[in-house]
Image: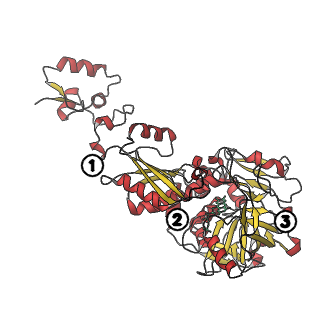
Protein backbone atom coordinates (compact mmCIF):
# COMPACT_ATOMS: atom_id res chain seq x y z
CA UNK A 1 0.00 0.00 0.00
CA UNK A 2 1.17 3.56 -0.73
CA UNK A 3 0.40 6.88 0.96
CA UNK A 4 -0.60 9.16 -1.97
CA UNK A 5 -4.04 10.61 -1.32
CA UNK A 6 -6.53 9.39 -3.93
CA UNK A 7 -9.30 11.48 -5.47
CA UNK A 8 -12.31 11.01 -3.18
CA UNK A 9 -14.88 12.55 -5.52
CA UNK A 10 -14.20 10.77 -8.83
CA UNK A 11 -16.07 7.57 -7.86
CA UNK A 12 -18.47 8.96 -5.26
CA UNK A 13 -22.19 8.33 -5.63
CA UNK A 14 -22.84 12.09 -5.86
CA UNK A 15 -20.37 12.43 -8.77
CA UNK A 16 -22.00 9.56 -10.61
CA UNK A 17 -25.46 11.09 -10.24
CA UNK A 18 -24.14 14.38 -11.62
CA UNK A 19 -23.14 12.56 -14.83
CA UNK A 20 -26.71 11.42 -15.52
CA UNK A 21 -29.04 13.39 -17.78
CA UNK A 22 -32.82 13.78 -17.47
CA UNK A 23 -33.51 10.60 -19.45
CA UNK A 24 -31.84 8.60 -16.70
CA UNK A 25 -32.25 10.65 -13.55
CA UNK A 26 -35.00 12.47 -11.70
CA UNK A 27 -34.48 14.79 -8.76
CA UNK A 28 -37.56 14.93 -6.53
CA UNK A 29 -37.63 18.11 -4.46
CA UNK A 30 -41.11 17.62 -2.99
CA UNK A 31 -40.93 16.29 0.58
CA UNK A 32 -41.66 12.54 0.65
CA UNK A 33 -42.74 10.10 3.31
CA UNK A 34 -40.69 6.90 3.49
CA UNK A 35 -43.95 4.99 3.06
CA UNK A 36 -44.22 6.31 -0.53
CA UNK A 37 -40.70 5.55 -1.74
CA UNK A 38 -41.31 1.95 -2.87
CA UNK A 39 -44.16 2.87 -5.20
CA UNK A 40 -42.13 5.80 -6.60
CA UNK A 41 -39.24 3.48 -7.47
CA UNK A 42 -41.09 0.37 -8.64
CA UNK A 43 -40.91 0.07 -12.44
CA UNK A 44 -39.35 3.54 -12.66
CA UNK A 45 -36.83 3.57 -15.54
CA UNK A 46 -34.88 6.39 -13.87
CA UNK A 47 -32.63 6.71 -10.87
CA UNK A 48 -34.35 9.03 -8.39
CA UNK A 49 -32.86 11.34 -5.77
CA UNK A 50 -35.41 12.25 -3.09
CA UNK A 51 -33.94 15.43 -1.70
CA UNK A 52 -36.34 15.78 1.23
CA UNK A 53 -37.49 12.82 3.24
CA UNK A 54 -39.72 13.66 6.21
CA UNK A 55 -37.80 13.32 9.49
CA UNK A 56 -34.55 12.35 7.78
CA UNK A 57 -31.38 14.41 7.80
CA UNK A 58 -30.23 12.64 4.63
CA UNK A 59 -31.54 12.57 1.06
CA UNK A 60 -32.31 9.13 -0.35
CA UNK A 61 -31.36 7.81 -3.76
CA UNK A 62 -32.72 4.70 -5.48
CA UNK A 63 -32.56 2.66 -8.71
CA UNK A 64 -29.01 3.87 -9.38
CA UNK A 65 -27.82 0.64 -11.03
CA UNK A 66 -31.26 -0.43 -12.26
CA UNK A 67 -30.44 0.02 -15.95
CA UNK A 68 -27.70 -1.40 -18.14
CA UNK A 69 -27.25 2.03 -19.69
CA UNK A 70 -26.47 3.58 -16.31
CA UNK A 71 -24.05 0.80 -15.32
CA UNK A 72 -22.35 1.17 -18.71
CA UNK A 73 -22.11 4.94 -18.12
CA UNK A 74 -20.28 4.32 -14.86
CA UNK A 75 -17.75 2.24 -16.81
CA UNK A 76 -17.59 4.87 -19.54
CA UNK A 77 -18.64 2.40 -22.22
CA UNK A 78 -21.71 1.22 -24.18
CA UNK A 79 -24.38 -1.28 -23.11
CA UNK A 80 -23.12 -3.70 -25.75
CA UNK A 81 -19.47 -3.45 -24.71
CA UNK A 82 -20.12 -3.47 -20.96
CA UNK A 83 -19.28 -7.15 -20.40
CA UNK A 84 -16.01 -6.91 -22.33
CA UNK A 85 -15.01 -3.74 -20.45
CA UNK A 86 -15.69 -5.36 -17.07
CA UNK A 87 -13.93 -8.61 -18.08
CA UNK A 88 -10.87 -6.64 -19.23
CA UNK A 89 -10.72 -4.59 -16.02
CA UNK A 90 -11.06 -7.76 -13.91
CA UNK A 91 -7.79 -9.01 -15.42
CA UNK A 92 -5.93 -6.09 -13.79
CA UNK A 93 -4.77 -6.07 -10.15
CA UNK A 94 -6.25 -3.40 -7.94
CA UNK A 95 -4.34 -1.17 -5.52
CA UNK A 96 -5.37 0.00 -2.04
CA UNK A 97 -4.20 3.28 -0.52
CA UNK A 98 -4.62 3.52 3.24
CA UNK A 99 -5.67 7.00 4.33
CA UNK A 100 -5.97 8.56 7.78
CA UNK A 101 -9.35 9.03 9.36
CA UNK A 102 -9.12 12.85 9.13
CA UNK A 103 -8.62 12.58 5.34
CA UNK A 104 -11.57 10.27 4.73
CA UNK A 105 -14.84 11.95 3.67
CA UNK A 106 -16.78 9.04 5.16
CA UNK A 107 -15.35 9.93 8.59
CA UNK A 108 -16.56 13.55 8.52
CA UNK A 109 -19.31 12.62 10.99
CA UNK A 110 -18.85 9.84 13.57
CA UNK A 111 -21.51 8.42 15.88
CA UNK A 112 -20.65 5.64 18.31
CA UNK A 113 -22.54 3.35 20.68
CA UNK A 114 -25.87 4.74 21.84
CA UNK A 115 -25.47 7.79 19.57
CA UNK A 116 -26.10 5.65 16.52
CA UNK A 117 -29.58 4.56 15.61
CA UNK A 118 -30.76 2.74 12.48
CA UNK A 119 -34.26 4.16 12.92
CA UNK A 120 -32.86 7.65 12.25
CA UNK A 121 -31.88 6.56 8.72
CA UNK A 122 -34.20 6.81 5.67
CA UNK A 123 -34.92 3.08 5.45
CA UNK A 124 -38.26 2.23 3.82
CA UNK A 125 -40.60 -0.74 3.49
CA UNK A 126 -39.85 -2.10 0.03
CA UNK A 127 -42.58 -4.69 -0.66
CA UNK A 128 -46.04 -5.07 0.84
CA UNK A 129 -45.37 -8.28 2.78
CA UNK A 130 -41.77 -7.59 3.85
CA UNK A 131 -41.09 -8.34 7.52
CA UNK A 132 -39.86 -4.78 8.20
CA UNK A 133 -37.98 -1.98 6.37
CA UNK A 134 -34.76 -3.27 4.81
CA UNK A 135 -31.40 -1.71 4.04
CA UNK A 136 -30.82 -3.03 0.52
CA UNK A 137 -27.78 -1.20 -0.91
CA UNK A 138 -25.49 -2.45 1.83
CA UNK A 139 -22.08 -3.71 0.70
CA UNK A 140 -20.65 -5.94 3.43
CA UNK A 141 -16.92 -5.92 4.18
CA UNK A 142 -15.47 -8.76 6.25
CA UNK A 143 -11.99 -10.19 6.84
CA UNK A 144 -11.64 -13.88 5.97
CA UNK A 145 -9.39 -15.20 8.78
CA UNK A 146 -8.35 -18.22 6.69
CA UNK A 147 -6.82 -16.12 3.87
CA UNK A 148 -6.37 -12.65 5.38
CA UNK A 149 -8.32 -11.29 2.40
CA UNK A 150 -11.25 -8.94 2.58
CA UNK A 151 -14.55 -10.42 1.42
CA UNK A 152 -17.08 -8.03 -0.12
CA UNK A 153 -20.70 -8.75 -1.07
CA UNK A 154 -24.06 -7.03 -1.10
CA UNK A 155 -26.40 -8.26 1.58
CA UNK A 156 -29.75 -6.94 2.76
CA UNK A 157 -30.43 -6.06 6.38
CA UNK A 158 -33.87 -6.32 7.98
CA UNK A 159 -33.97 -3.60 10.62
CA UNK A 160 -35.24 -5.11 13.87
CA UNK A 161 -34.16 -2.43 16.34
CA UNK A 162 -32.13 0.74 16.80
CA UNK A 163 -28.84 -1.15 16.67
CA UNK A 164 -29.93 -4.58 15.45
CA UNK A 165 -30.70 -6.10 12.07
CA UNK A 166 -31.10 -9.56 10.55
CA UNK A 167 -28.70 -10.28 7.70
CA UNK A 168 -29.54 -12.72 4.91
CA UNK A 169 -26.98 -15.51 5.05
CA UNK A 170 -28.94 -18.48 3.71
CA UNK A 171 -27.72 -18.81 0.11
CA UNK A 172 -24.24 -20.32 -0.38
CA UNK A 173 -21.68 -17.47 -0.30
CA UNK A 174 -18.19 -16.75 0.97
CA UNK A 175 -19.56 -14.68 3.84
CA UNK A 176 -21.88 -17.50 4.87
CA UNK A 177 -18.94 -19.92 4.95
CA UNK A 178 -16.80 -17.46 6.96
CA UNK A 179 -19.64 -16.82 9.39
CA UNK A 180 -20.45 -20.49 9.97
CA UNK A 181 -16.79 -21.34 10.63
CA UNK A 182 -16.34 -18.48 13.11
CA UNK A 183 -19.67 -18.79 14.91
CA UNK A 184 -19.10 -22.53 15.39
CA UNK A 185 -15.90 -21.57 17.25
CA UNK A 186 -17.99 -19.17 19.37
CA UNK A 187 -16.49 -16.11 17.65
CA UNK A 188 -18.13 -12.93 16.42
CA UNK A 189 -17.49 -11.75 12.85
CA UNK A 190 -16.64 -8.03 12.61
CA UNK A 191 -18.45 -6.52 9.63
CA UNK A 192 -18.93 -3.07 8.15
CA UNK A 193 -21.65 -2.19 5.66
CA UNK A 194 -20.90 0.43 3.01
CA UNK A 195 -23.85 2.54 1.88
CA UNK A 196 -23.88 4.95 -1.04
CA UNK A 197 -21.66 3.77 -3.89
CA UNK A 198 -21.09 4.11 -7.60
CA UNK A 199 -22.49 1.21 -9.69
CA UNK A 200 -18.87 0.15 -10.27
CA UNK A 201 -18.48 -0.79 -6.60
CA UNK A 202 -21.76 -2.70 -6.62
CA UNK A 203 -20.66 -4.65 -9.70
CA UNK A 204 -17.40 -5.52 -7.90
CA UNK A 205 -19.28 -6.60 -4.78
CA UNK A 206 -21.36 -9.16 -6.68
CA UNK A 207 -18.28 -10.93 -8.07
CA UNK A 208 -17.11 -14.15 -6.43
CA UNK A 209 -13.47 -14.28 -7.35
CA UNK A 210 -10.84 -15.82 -5.04
CA UNK A 211 -8.88 -12.66 -4.24
CA UNK A 212 -8.91 -9.71 -1.85
CA UNK A 213 -12.24 -8.33 -3.01
CA UNK A 214 -11.56 -4.72 -1.93
CA UNK A 215 -8.91 -4.76 -4.64
CA UNK A 216 -11.64 -5.73 -7.11
CA UNK A 217 -13.26 -2.34 -6.47
CA UNK A 218 -9.98 -0.71 -7.42
CA UNK A 219 -9.48 -2.98 -10.45
CA UNK A 220 -12.96 -2.20 -11.76
CA UNK A 221 -12.57 1.52 -11.09
CA UNK A 222 -9.23 1.41 -12.92
CA UNK A 223 -7.76 3.59 -10.14
CA UNK A 224 -6.32 2.97 -6.66
CA UNK A 225 -8.97 2.76 -3.93
CA UNK A 226 -8.56 4.92 -0.83
CA UNK A 227 -9.45 2.88 2.25
CA UNK A 228 -9.85 4.00 5.85
CA UNK A 229 -9.81 1.93 9.03
CA UNK A 230 -13.13 1.66 10.81
CA UNK A 231 -13.54 3.29 14.23
CA UNK A 232 -14.93 0.32 16.18
CA UNK A 233 -13.50 -2.67 14.29
CA UNK A 234 -10.29 -3.36 12.39
CA UNK A 235 -11.79 -3.47 8.90
CA UNK A 236 -10.77 -1.14 6.07
CA UNK A 237 -13.54 0.38 3.97
CA UNK A 238 -13.77 2.74 0.95
CA UNK A 239 -12.98 6.23 2.27
CA UNK A 240 -15.16 7.89 -0.39
CA UNK A 241 -18.39 6.06 0.54
CA UNK A 242 -21.41 8.00 1.73
CA UNK A 243 -21.90 6.06 4.98
CA UNK A 244 -20.50 3.08 6.90
CA UNK A 245 -22.43 0.97 9.40
CA UNK A 246 -19.82 -0.64 11.66
CA UNK A 247 -20.47 -3.62 13.88
CA UNK A 248 -20.36 -7.37 14.08
CA UNK A 249 -22.38 -10.52 13.43
CA UNK A 250 -22.87 -12.18 16.78
CA UNK A 251 -21.62 -15.67 17.56
CA UNK A 252 -25.04 -17.23 18.17
CA UNK A 253 -25.62 -18.52 14.63
CA UNK A 254 -28.79 -18.35 12.51
CA UNK A 255 -31.10 -17.30 15.34
CA UNK A 256 -33.24 -14.36 14.23
CA UNK A 257 -36.37 -14.46 12.09
CA UNK A 258 -35.64 -12.60 8.88
CA UNK A 259 -38.22 -12.13 6.10
CA UNK A 260 -40.54 -12.36 4.32
CA UNK A 261 -38.82 -10.31 1.63
CA UNK A 262 -39.52 -9.57 -2.04
CA UNK A 263 -36.68 -11.57 -3.57
CA UNK A 264 -34.65 -11.02 -6.70
CA UNK A 265 -36.53 -13.66 -8.70
CA UNK A 266 -39.74 -11.66 -8.50
CA UNK A 267 -41.43 -13.65 -5.70
CA UNK A 268 -41.44 -13.48 -1.92
CA UNK A 269 -38.97 -15.50 0.10
CA UNK A 270 -40.46 -16.71 3.39
CA UNK A 271 -39.34 -16.17 6.98
CA UNK A 272 -35.86 -17.65 7.55
CA UNK A 273 -33.50 -18.00 10.46
CA UNK A 274 -30.50 -15.73 10.02
CA UNK A 275 -27.61 -14.17 11.99
CA UNK A 276 -27.91 -10.86 13.85
CA UNK A 277 -25.91 -7.75 12.97
CA UNK A 278 -25.10 -5.45 15.91
CA UNK A 279 -24.37 -1.81 15.10
CA UNK A 280 -21.44 -0.21 16.95
CA UNK A 281 -20.86 2.98 14.93
CA UNK A 282 -22.15 5.02 12.00
CA UNK A 283 -19.72 7.20 10.09
CA UNK A 284 -20.73 9.38 7.14
CA UNK A 285 -20.05 12.34 4.92
CA UNK A 286 -21.51 15.69 6.02
CA UNK A 287 -23.51 15.82 2.79
CA UNK A 288 -24.28 12.09 2.86
CA UNK A 289 -26.76 10.56 0.39
CA UNK A 290 -28.41 7.37 1.67
CA UNK A 291 -29.01 4.68 -0.96
CA UNK A 292 -31.59 1.97 -1.58
CA UNK A 293 -31.60 -0.75 -4.25
CA UNK A 294 -34.70 -2.13 -5.94
CA UNK A 295 -34.86 -5.90 -5.60
CA UNK A 296 -38.25 -7.24 -6.68
CA UNK A 297 -41.25 -5.89 -8.56
CA UNK A 298 -43.40 -6.34 -11.63
CA UNK A 299 -40.62 -5.43 -14.09
CA UNK A 300 -37.44 -7.20 -13.08
CA UNK A 301 -35.35 -5.45 -15.73
CA UNK A 302 -35.93 -2.15 -13.91
CA UNK A 303 -34.38 -3.37 -10.65
CA UNK A 304 -30.83 -2.92 -9.37
CA UNK A 305 -30.56 -6.61 -8.50
CA UNK A 306 -31.51 -7.97 -11.93
CA UNK A 307 -29.14 -5.59 -13.74
CA UNK A 308 -26.23 -6.27 -11.37
CA UNK A 309 -26.90 -10.01 -11.30
CA UNK A 310 -27.05 -10.08 -15.11
CA UNK A 311 -23.59 -8.59 -15.41
CA UNK A 312 -22.20 -11.00 -12.85
CA UNK A 313 -23.76 -13.96 -14.70
CA UNK A 314 -22.31 -12.70 -17.98
CA UNK A 315 -18.81 -12.42 -16.48
CA UNK A 316 -18.92 -15.97 -15.07
CA UNK A 317 -20.27 -17.42 -18.33
CA UNK A 318 -17.83 -15.46 -20.48
CA UNK A 319 -14.83 -16.61 -18.45
CA UNK A 320 -15.96 -20.25 -18.75
CA UNK A 321 -16.57 -19.95 -22.49
CA UNK A 322 -13.23 -18.25 -23.15
CA UNK A 323 -11.65 -21.55 -22.16
CA UNK A 324 -14.28 -23.93 -23.57
CA UNK A 325 -14.85 -22.51 -27.07
CA UNK A 326 -12.80 -19.33 -27.60
CA UNK A 327 -14.67 -17.15 -30.15
CA UNK A 328 -17.45 -15.78 -27.96
CA UNK A 329 -18.88 -12.62 -29.52
CA UNK A 330 -21.28 -11.73 -26.72
CA UNK A 331 -23.10 -12.95 -23.61
CA UNK A 332 -26.35 -11.48 -22.34
CA UNK A 333 -28.27 -12.59 -19.25
CA UNK A 334 -31.68 -11.11 -19.84
CA UNK A 335 -32.56 -9.04 -16.72
CA UNK A 336 -36.24 -9.79 -17.35
CA UNK A 337 -35.41 -13.31 -16.10
CA UNK A 338 -33.81 -11.85 -12.96
CA UNK A 339 -30.42 -11.70 -14.66
CA UNK A 340 -29.50 -15.30 -13.95
CA UNK A 341 -31.71 -18.07 -15.36
CA UNK A 342 -31.80 -17.31 -19.11
CA UNK A 343 -28.50 -16.69 -20.88
CA UNK A 344 -27.90 -15.83 -24.54
CA UNK A 345 -24.52 -16.41 -26.17
CA UNK A 346 -23.35 -15.25 -29.60
CA UNK A 347 -20.69 -17.64 -30.81
CA UNK A 348 -18.56 -17.99 -33.92
CA UNK A 349 -18.07 -21.70 -34.22
CA UNK A 350 -14.61 -22.76 -35.32
CA UNK A 351 -15.48 -26.41 -35.75
CA UNK A 352 -18.75 -28.37 -35.86
CA UNK A 353 -20.27 -29.03 -32.44
CA UNK A 354 -18.94 -25.95 -30.64
CA UNK A 355 -22.45 -24.61 -29.98
CA UNK A 356 -23.27 -27.76 -28.05
CA UNK A 357 -19.91 -27.65 -26.22
CA UNK A 358 -20.76 -24.08 -25.22
CA UNK A 359 -24.12 -25.22 -23.82
CA UNK A 360 -22.39 -27.86 -21.70
CA UNK A 361 -19.81 -25.34 -20.41
CA UNK A 362 -22.52 -22.85 -19.42
CA UNK A 363 -24.55 -25.56 -17.66
CA UNK A 364 -21.55 -26.38 -15.50
CA UNK A 365 -20.19 -22.93 -14.70
CA UNK A 366 -23.01 -21.54 -12.58
CA UNK A 367 -25.84 -22.97 -10.49
CA UNK A 368 -28.10 -20.06 -11.36
CA UNK A 369 -28.16 -20.56 -15.14
CA UNK A 370 -30.96 -22.86 -16.30
CA UNK A 371 -31.57 -22.03 -19.98
CA UNK A 372 -28.87 -21.35 -22.54
CA UNK A 373 -29.44 -20.03 -26.06
CA UNK A 374 -26.50 -20.15 -28.49
CA UNK A 375 -26.76 -18.05 -31.66
CA UNK A 376 -24.55 -17.12 -34.61
CA UNK A 377 -22.76 -13.75 -34.37
CA UNK A 378 -25.20 -12.12 -36.83
CA UNK A 379 -27.99 -12.36 -34.22
CA UNK A 380 -28.29 -9.40 -31.85
CA UNK A 381 -28.45 -11.06 -28.43
CA UNK A 382 -29.82 -7.86 -26.87
CA UNK A 383 -32.89 -8.05 -29.13
CA UNK A 384 -35.74 -10.37 -28.10
CA UNK A 385 -37.11 -9.94 -31.65
CA UNK A 386 -33.91 -11.33 -33.16
CA UNK A 387 -33.82 -14.16 -30.64
CA UNK A 388 -37.42 -15.12 -31.50
CA UNK A 389 -36.49 -15.19 -35.19
CA UNK A 390 -33.45 -17.39 -34.55
CA UNK A 391 -35.58 -19.74 -32.46
CA UNK A 392 -38.21 -19.89 -35.20
CA UNK A 393 -35.85 -20.45 -38.13
CA UNK A 394 -32.61 -22.04 -36.87
CA UNK A 395 -33.85 -24.57 -34.36
CA UNK A 396 -35.11 -28.16 -34.66
CA UNK A 397 -36.27 -29.55 -31.34
CA UNK A 398 -35.18 -33.13 -32.09
CA UNK A 399 -31.50 -32.32 -32.65
CA UNK A 400 -30.81 -28.80 -31.39
CA UNK A 401 -31.96 -29.16 -27.80
CA UNK A 402 -29.79 -30.41 -24.95
CA UNK A 403 -31.59 -31.41 -21.80
CA UNK A 404 -29.85 -32.49 -18.61
CA UNK A 405 -30.92 -32.82 -15.03
CA UNK A 406 -29.67 -33.29 -11.46
CA UNK A 407 -27.63 -30.06 -11.28
CA UNK A 408 -26.99 -27.92 -8.22
CA UNK A 409 -29.99 -25.60 -7.91
CA UNK A 410 -30.71 -22.08 -6.73
CA UNK A 411 -32.97 -22.88 -3.76
CA UNK A 412 -35.17 -19.78 -4.21
CA UNK A 413 -36.36 -20.96 -7.66
CA UNK A 414 -40.14 -21.46 -7.21
CA UNK A 415 -40.30 -23.93 -10.12
CA UNK A 416 -38.21 -26.45 -8.15
CA UNK A 417 -41.27 -27.33 -6.08
CA UNK A 418 -39.12 -28.60 -3.20
CA UNK A 419 -36.68 -30.53 -5.47
CA UNK A 420 -33.06 -30.22 -4.35
CA UNK A 421 -31.52 -30.25 -7.84
CA UNK A 422 -32.48 -28.53 -11.06
CA UNK A 423 -32.92 -29.37 -14.75
CA UNK A 424 -31.20 -27.40 -17.51
CA UNK A 425 -32.03 -26.88 -21.17
CA UNK A 426 -29.79 -25.66 -23.97
CA UNK A 427 -31.03 -24.38 -27.33
CA UNK A 428 -28.62 -24.52 -30.27
CA UNK A 429 -30.05 -21.75 -32.47
CA UNK A 430 -27.11 -21.71 -34.89
CA UNK A 431 -27.31 -22.38 -38.61
CA UNK A 432 -25.73 -25.60 -39.92
CA UNK A 433 -21.97 -25.29 -39.53
CA UNK A 434 -20.07 -24.01 -42.57
CA UNK A 435 -16.41 -23.16 -42.92
CA UNK A 436 -16.19 -19.42 -43.55
CA UNK A 437 -18.98 -16.83 -43.67
CA UNK A 438 -19.13 -16.67 -47.48
CA UNK A 439 -19.89 -20.37 -47.68
CA UNK A 440 -23.41 -19.86 -46.32
CA UNK A 441 -25.92 -21.32 -48.78
CA UNK A 442 -28.31 -18.79 -50.31
CA UNK A 443 -31.21 -20.13 -48.28
CA UNK A 444 -29.33 -19.28 -45.05
CA UNK A 445 -28.37 -15.78 -46.07
CA UNK A 446 -30.27 -12.89 -44.54
CA UNK A 447 -32.00 -10.51 -46.99
CA UNK A 448 -31.10 -6.84 -46.58
CA UNK A 449 -31.85 -3.73 -48.66
CA UNK A 450 -29.49 -3.53 -51.70
CA UNK A 451 -26.35 -1.41 -51.27
CA UNK A 452 -25.04 -1.11 -54.90
CA UNK A 453 -21.46 -1.11 -53.71
CA UNK A 454 -18.71 -2.77 -55.72
CA UNK A 455 -16.65 -1.89 -58.78
CA UNK A 456 -17.84 0.57 -61.43
CA UNK A 457 -17.74 -0.27 -65.16
CA UNK A 458 -18.42 1.60 -68.42
CA UNK A 459 -21.07 -0.88 -69.45
CA UNK A 460 -23.03 -3.89 -68.30
CA UNK A 461 -21.09 -5.98 -70.76
CA UNK A 462 -17.78 -4.87 -69.17
CA UNK A 463 -19.18 -5.67 -65.72
CA UNK A 464 -20.19 -9.18 -66.80
CA UNK A 465 -16.87 -9.76 -68.51
CA UNK A 466 -15.30 -9.07 -65.09
CA UNK A 467 -17.21 -12.05 -63.65
CA UNK A 468 -20.66 -13.26 -62.48
CA UNK A 469 -22.75 -10.57 -60.78
CA UNK A 470 -25.98 -10.26 -58.82
CA UNK A 471 -28.56 -7.80 -60.14
CA UNK A 472 -27.64 -5.24 -57.46
CA UNK A 473 -24.00 -5.44 -58.55
CA UNK A 474 -24.98 -4.82 -62.19
CA UNK A 475 -27.00 -1.78 -61.11
CA UNK A 476 -24.09 -0.57 -59.00
CA UNK A 477 -21.62 -1.23 -61.83
CA UNK A 478 -23.29 1.34 -64.11
CA UNK A 479 -24.71 3.55 -61.29
CA UNK A 480 -28.27 2.72 -62.36
CA UNK A 481 -30.88 4.56 -60.31
CA UNK A 482 -33.75 2.16 -60.97
CA UNK A 483 -32.52 -1.00 -62.71
CA UNK A 484 -34.74 -0.62 -65.78
CA UNK A 485 -31.84 -0.27 -68.20
CA UNK A 486 -30.31 -3.44 -66.74
CA UNK A 487 -33.50 -5.41 -67.46
CA UNK A 488 -33.64 -4.01 -70.99
CA UNK A 489 -29.97 -4.76 -71.66
CA UNK A 490 -30.31 -8.33 -70.36
CA UNK A 491 -33.37 -8.91 -72.57
CA UNK A 492 -31.73 -7.39 -75.65
CA UNK A 493 -28.42 -9.24 -75.23
CA UNK A 494 -29.61 -12.52 -73.77
CA UNK A 495 -28.97 -14.51 -76.93
CA UNK A 496 -26.24 -12.51 -78.63
CA UNK A 497 -24.02 -12.36 -75.51
CA UNK A 498 -25.01 -15.86 -74.22
CA UNK A 499 -26.23 -14.55 -70.85
CA UNK A 500 -26.93 -17.27 -68.28
CA UNK A 501 -27.31 -17.50 -64.51
CA UNK A 502 -25.35 -19.59 -62.06
CA UNK A 503 -26.86 -21.63 -59.19
CA UNK A 504 -26.93 -18.59 -56.86
CA UNK A 505 -28.73 -16.51 -59.49
CA UNK A 506 -25.75 -14.38 -60.58
CA UNK A 507 -25.69 -13.29 -64.24
CA UNK A 508 -22.69 -14.26 -66.36
CA UNK A 509 -21.53 -14.51 -69.95
CA UNK A 510 -21.17 -18.12 -71.02
CA UNK A 511 -17.78 -18.78 -72.63
C1 LIG B 1 -28.69 -5.47 -4.73
C2 LIG B 1 -28.22 -6.85 -4.33
C3 LIG B 1 -28.63 -7.41 -3.11
C4 LIG B 1 -28.18 -8.66 -2.72
N1 LIG B 1 -28.61 -9.18 -1.54
C5 LIG B 1 -28.19 -10.41 -1.14
C6 LIG B 1 -28.62 -10.96 0.08
O1 LIG B 1 -29.37 -10.36 0.83
N2 LIG B 1 -28.18 -12.21 0.42
C7 LIG B 1 -27.32 -12.91 -0.36
O2 LIG B 1 -26.93 -14.04 0.00
N3 LIG B 1 -26.88 -12.41 -1.54
C8 LIG B 1 -27.30 -11.18 -1.94
N4 LIG B 1 -26.86 -10.66 -3.13
C9 LIG B 1 -25.89 -11.43 -3.92
C10 LIG B 1 -24.49 -11.35 -3.31
O3 LIG B 1 -24.09 -10.01 -3.10
C11 LIG B 1 -23.46 -12.01 -4.21
O4 LIG B 1 -23.81 -13.37 -4.32
C12 LIG B 1 -22.05 -11.90 -3.69
O5 LIG B 1 -21.18 -12.39 -4.67
C13 LIG B 1 -21.81 -12.68 -2.44
O6 LIG B 1 -20.49 -12.44 -2.03
P1 LIG B 1 -19.55 -13.51 -1.33
O7 LIG B 1 -19.82 -14.88 -1.93
O8 LIG B 1 -18.18 -12.99 -1.66
O9 LIG B 1 -19.83 -13.48 0.13
C14 LIG B 1 -27.31 -9.40 -3.54
C15 LIG B 1 -26.90 -8.86 -4.75
C16 LIG B 1 -27.36 -7.60 -5.15
C17 LIG B 1 -26.89 -7.06 -6.48
- Identity of the residue drawn at 56% across and 59% down: 420
Q: Nearer the viewer, mark 2 or mark 3?
A: 3
Q: Which residue is mark 3?
A: 161
Choose the circle earlier in sequence order: 1 or 3. 3
Answer whether labels 1 and 3 touch (C-beta < 8 Å): no
Helix, strand or loop status at disc 1: loop
Answer whether labels 2 and 1 touch (C-beta < 8 Å): no
Q: Which residue is mark 2?
A: 89
Q: How is the image coloured?
A: secondary structure
Q: Nearer the viewer, residue 497 or 211?
A: 211
Helix, strand or loop status at disc 3: loop
Relative height, residue 265 to residue 172 (above, below): above
CA–CA distance between discs 2 and 3? 40 Å
Q: Which residue is mark 1?
A: 435
Q: Which residue lies most toward the left here? A: 511
CA–CA distance between discs 2 and 1? 33 Å
Q: Is residue 488 visible?
A: yes
Q: Nearer the viewer, mark 2 or mark 1?
A: 1
Q: Nearer the viewer, residue 130 or 81?
A: 130
**Would you say the beta carbon of the disc 3 residue lies within 8 angstroms of ligand 1?**
no
Amino acid sequence: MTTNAPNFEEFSLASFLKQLDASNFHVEDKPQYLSDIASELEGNPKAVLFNHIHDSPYPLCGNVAASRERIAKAFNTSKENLLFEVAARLKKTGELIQVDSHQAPVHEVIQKGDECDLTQLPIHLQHGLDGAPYISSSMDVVMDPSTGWTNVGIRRLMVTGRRKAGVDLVAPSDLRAIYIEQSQKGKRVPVSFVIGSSPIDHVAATMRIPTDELKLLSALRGKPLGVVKCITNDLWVPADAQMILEGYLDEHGHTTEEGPYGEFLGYYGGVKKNPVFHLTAITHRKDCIFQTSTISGAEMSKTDTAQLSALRTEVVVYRALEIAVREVKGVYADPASGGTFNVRVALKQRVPGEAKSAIAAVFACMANVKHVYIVDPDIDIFSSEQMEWAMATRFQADKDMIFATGFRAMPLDPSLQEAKTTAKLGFDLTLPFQFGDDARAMTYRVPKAPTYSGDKFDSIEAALQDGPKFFQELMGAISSKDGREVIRWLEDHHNSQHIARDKEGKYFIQP
